[in-house]
Amino acid sequence: MGSIYKNIQDTIGKGEKLLAVLIDPDKFSIENTHRFIDKVNKSIVTHIFVGGSIVDEGTTDNVVSEIKKHTNLPIVLFPGDITQITGEADALLFLSLLSGRHPDYLIGKHVEAVSKLTKTQLEILPTGYVLIESGNITAVEKVTNTKPLSRKNIQIIVDTAKAGQLLGMKLIYLEAGSGAKTPLTQKIISYVKQELDIPLIVGGGIRSKVELDNAYNAGADLVVIGTAFEEDESFFDNLRE
């Protein structure tokens, strides 16, 4: 694996936690880039994720290009479709939707993406993506036509994440979904983390410093926050060094 994955491993090995701000290109104002990224740079954010379930073609490329002018933080694509692939970023989460059973999102879309990826210098990060129900129907559900896993069956969640590791995934991403009513419980995060030997990413529904700390304390290695920043940029004020 490349330098970004190695850095993630090294940081976790030192007992430190990572935080990514998720930017949805369709909801992001390019004119606001400098001010927004300045807040990111002054916070404890370590990575910038860029992507969304539905994004107009070409938008991701423009957003990533502009963001790069204002930060040295690694920019990682979190693509909802192959049209969101851009060589302007540093890395890409090569997502396999393990919680669903739709062949396109287990392998089909990946095959389509290969010819485009080989023309870039992107660091590819094989990632098992596990969507867990959150009280809302998420964009991921609508786009992929799959159902999330129930929060009540923790063993299935654990086994799904572990299966991803055994299949060779380098990261597991537990996701409550964009706009989730509540974040994943500490019990879910803890049980999954206990069974993994690879980094665990957790996202969805985290809107406070307390909820962020709860995810870390339960075992999340990297937390992703998107909606909280979209709705209230003052959230950055609680995340300064």
Image (spheres, helix red, strand yellow):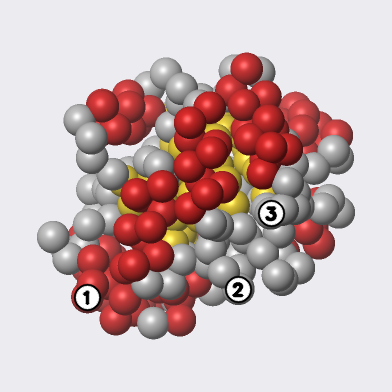
Provide the residue designation for mark 3: 151
Q: Quadrant of residue 106?
A: top right
In three-dimensional space, the C-alpha distance between marks 1 and 3, rounded to whole angstroms, equals 32 Å
Q: Quadrant of the N terminus?
A: top left
Give x and y (percent) for residue 231.
Answer: 45, 81
Counting residues from the N terminus, which is met first, the one under dot 2 or under dot 3? 3
In three-dimensional space, the C-alpha distance between marks 2 and 1, rounded to whole angstroms, equals 23 Å
**Vertical side of 147 occupied by 167: above or below:** above
- Is residue 152 in view? yes
Amino acid type at circle 1 is Asp
Name the mark on residue 237: 1
Viewer-nearest of discs 2 and 3: 3
Q: Quadrant of residue 8?
A: top left
Residue at (68% x, 30% y) in the render: 159
Residue at (53% x, 57% y) in the render: 185
Name the mark on residue 181: 2
Amino acid type at circle 2 is Lys
Instruction: Determine contact: label 2, label 1, CB under 8 Å.
Output: no
Horizontal side, residue 68 vs residue 132: left or right: left
Local crowd size for mark 1, using a 10 Å CA cut-off: few (<14), some (14–19), many (≥20): few
Give x and y (percent) for residue 189.
Answer: 51, 46
Give x and y (percent) for residue 41.
Answer: 21, 60
